[in-house]
Amino acid sequence: MAAYAASERGPYAGRPGKGRAARVSLGRVVLPSDGFEVSYMGYSYRRSAMSTLVRTTCAVVTGLLVLAASSPASAKPKWSDAHPRRAEVNDRLNHQNARIKEGVKSGKLTHEQAQQLHREDKAVRQEERQMAAQHHGHITKAEQHKLNRQENAVSGQIHEEKHP
């Protein structure tokens, strides 16, 4: 016991614990395998390894839960294609795209005509996305009405070019 300072106090002062050599001095942390001891201002404090393991595990699990709760995967997508007005507009655009492809396949539309119709559909789709970006993922009734009018015009062009 000569290796330990006589000024150390507390329940574990001067004891290495379970036959292991552990030295505690002012402000020094000793980490034996069965826990750790901290000496501060002449007092020695000891925490068991199990207590340290439980605290560390709880801290890690809590951190992971907070991280999982704040992850973007659990957040609502910024642009919701599932909004009813957007879905209706996009369904019409998809249907028109299929009509154009069918017209090319049947020989009623030339590739040049199909490219022009696809460009017009693409412009409507791009405008729909810009409108949705302004309103946090949805479009207003007035915007839907405007897009429907544009789609009606393209639909009429598809019909006229397929059935001259």
Image (cartoon, grey):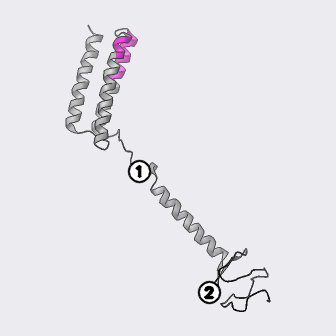
> Is residue 3 within the magenta segment?
no
Examine the rendered structure and indicate whether residue 157 appears above or below residue 60. Answer: above
Which of the image's four quarters has the C terminus?
top left
What residue is shown at x 70% (from left), y 74% (from top)? 31
Task: Please give left or right for residue 100 compared with residue 29 in the image.
Answer: left
Mark 2 vs mark 1, CA separation in Å: 49 Å
The mark lying in front, picked from 2 and 1, is 2
Specify which label sits upstream in the sequence, 2 or 1.
2
Residue at 24% x, 30% y is 147
Mark 2 crowdedness (10 Å alpha carbons): few <14, some 14-19, many ≥20: few
**Which residue position holds label 2?**
41
In the image, residue 50 sits, relative to residue 136, either above or below, namely below
Given residues 76 and 29, the one toward you in this image is 29
Magenta-colored span: 95-115
116 vs 149, nearest the viewer? 116
Quadrant in which the N terminus appears:
bottom right
Q: Main secondary structure of the magenta part?
A: helix
Say which mark, if any, is on residue 36.
none
